[in-house]
Image (tube, rainbow, N blue to C red):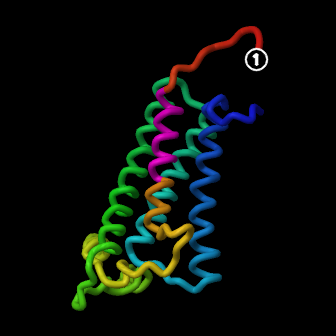
């Protein structure tokens, strides 16, 4: 395999994207949540869901090895999940950098919210109206909070998926 990921095949690029997405979710769960004891807010969980959706379509694309139209469809599906995750991350960052509201609350934690107490539509609506605990930034790396890092990864992975799905592929009969 070539060392330059821009020269990899579509399947290899999408497999790499799936590994990154599932690796980021595993990092958030095992390291941040279990090891450091930082419980996720509802917005964090929806961002994880966006990574799982991206990872699933990356993996489907890698396993399928589609033609031109299929590559474009997979690229758009991954980009949609990346866009949804980026919008949630931007809203989360806005909450973190806005002046604190003493009466704001993030509501219930994610697990309580979906513990059969509310219909799904009402639970999702309550999660997106959250504003309290979501504004706390307990975890930072290089001065960037968790939603900042997720936004960076959504842009990189979504852009990479679109590039890989829409780039012109040359067929080489002879040579490398």
Q: Is residue 117 visible?
A: no
Residue 92 magenta-drawn?
Answer: no
Which element is circle 1 on?
A: loop
The residue wearing badge 1 is 176
Q: Is residue 136 visible?
A: yes
Residue 158 magenta-drawn?
Answer: yes
93, above or below 171, in the image: below
Q: Characterize the local packing of mark 1: few (<14), some (14-19) or many (20 or more) Cα atoms within 10 angstroms.
A: few
Residue 134: percent from left, percent from top? 37, 78
Residue 132: percent from left, percent from top? 31, 84
Q: Residue furthest bottom?
A: 102
The residue segment tinted magenta is: 154-166
Residue 145: percent from left, percent from top? 47, 70
Residue 129: percent from left, percent from top? 25, 75
Tell whether 80 sits left or right of 40.
left
Residue at 58% x, 73% y is: 29
Quarter in which the C terminus is drawn: top right
Q: Residue furthest front?
A: 143
């Amino acid at each position: 395999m070539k060392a330059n990921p821009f020269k990899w095949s579509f399947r290899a690029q999408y497999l790499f994207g799936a590994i990154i997405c599932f690796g980021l979710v595993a990092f958030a769960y095992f390291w941040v949540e279990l090891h450091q004891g930082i419980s996720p807010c509802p917005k964090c969980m929806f961002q994880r869901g966006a990574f799982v959706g991206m990872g699933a379509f990356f993996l489907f694309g890698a396993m399928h090895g589609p033609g031109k139209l299929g590559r474009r469809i997979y690229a758009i599906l991954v980009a949609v999940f990346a866009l949804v995750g980026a919008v949630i991350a931007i809203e989360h960052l806005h909450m973190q950098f806005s002046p604190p509201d003493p009466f704001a609350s993030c509501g219930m934690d994610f697990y309580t919210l979906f513990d059969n107490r509310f219909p799904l539509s009402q639970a999702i609506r309550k999660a997106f109206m959250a504003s309290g605990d979501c504004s706390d930034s307990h975890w930072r790396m290089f001065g960037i909070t968790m939603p900042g890092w997720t936004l960076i990864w959504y842009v990189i992975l979504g852009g990479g998926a679109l590039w890989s799905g829409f780039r012109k592929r040359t067929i080489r009969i002879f040579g490398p």
